[in-house]
Amino acid sequence: MSTLPRWVRQHLAAVRALLVLTLVLGLAYPLAVAAVAQLPGLRDRADGSLITLDGKVVGSSLIGQSFLDEDGNPLKQYFQSRISNAGDGYDPTATSASNLGPEDIVDTLPDPALTAAGKEDENASDSLLTRVCTASAEAGRLEGADGSRPFCTKEGRGAVLSVLGPRDARGVVQHPTRVVSANEQCPATPFLTEYKGVKVECNPYGTDLSTARIVPIRGDAPATPAVPADAVTGSGSGLDPHISVAWANLQAGRVAKTRGLTRPQVLELVAASTTGRALGFMGEPAVNVLRLNIALDRTAPYRTG
């Protein structure tokens, strides 16, 4: 009996393995998973945990949404979601975080010539600190609460000084020769009048401050801000549909007033939309914003005019 060459047998074995694995992993396994996903109790999650209102799909309980008007301003009749860095906001095809760290505290200021011409300086950007400060100040104004935070100016920028002068062995400038408010571009009035006896200046565009020592100023804001941390930061995915109970409670007064409800009535809806800790011990209770806003529309439909 003749035998096939070794290289032919090897190729035939590879083809057989390919066919078997294709049938098992490419056909049988996906069909089995799809069939299991349609079992009672699993079908809703497998289909994307979709939420419907009046027979229309309005979103997923797993993906957050922004509740803003066409100009990007918060809709006062709704609870607000977290900041999202995913695309233009909560884009599941562009899930992303800001990728900024705790040491990112100095802004890259815009070119005033471009600003005066009504153009955007693509090289300019706010630091993580300024983003947090701005969001906290805006949330405070929206909710009628104290939006101040440590290391933030009252206007909502990072309270950071660029201090120039000779340094000691530890790198500390004991006797400054010049002090600039790093994140307040001229002609702004600096948040601090003087530092170690030296007048604080606004930051003139184009000045080289690379040799300056960066000094954050804590200020007199309370150690525990009234605006919770999740109101001023985004999640790692940019898709988190939940907010903390503390932030929901802070928004309850504004939503109640806008919809003509009492604050206790709104807090009942908050409690009904609050999920417990995962497995009973991981994480903290959280409020699903989409479910809560749908409950509001069903309980007290908002009417303009």
Image (cartoon, rainbow, N blue to C red):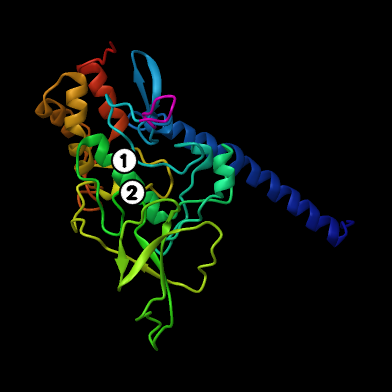
**Residue 287 appears in the picture as rendered:** no
**Can you tell which mark lies on residue 255?**
none
Q: Callout 1: helix, strand or loop? A: helix
Q: Which amino acid type is marked by label 2? A: Gly
Residue at 53% across / 41% down in the picture? Answer: 94
Q: Disc 2 vs disc 1: Cβ atoms closer than 8 Å?
A: yes
For label 1, the residue is: 138
Residue at the image position 33 percent from the left and 13 percent from the top? 54
167 lies left or right of 26: left
Would you identify the image quadrant in which residue 80 lies? top left
Is 167 rendered above or below residue 33? Answer: below
Kindly identify the residue that appears in the image at 88 percent across and 59 percent down.
5
Q: Characterize the local packing of mark 1: few (<14), some (14-19) or many (20 or more) Cα atoms within 10 angstroms.
A: some
The quarter of the picture where residue 176 lies is bottom left
Give the x, y percent position of residue 179: 40, 68
Instruction: Decide which of 84, 24 is in the foreground and name it.
Output: 84
Q: Which residues are magenta?
A: 66-73
Relative image position of residue 121 (x, y in whole percent): 58, 46
Instruction: Please name the amino acid that badge 1 sits on.
Output: Glu
Quick check: 170 above or below 116? below
Q: Is residue 146 above or below residue 198?
A: above
**Residue 227, can we see it?**
yes
Residue hosting label 2: 156
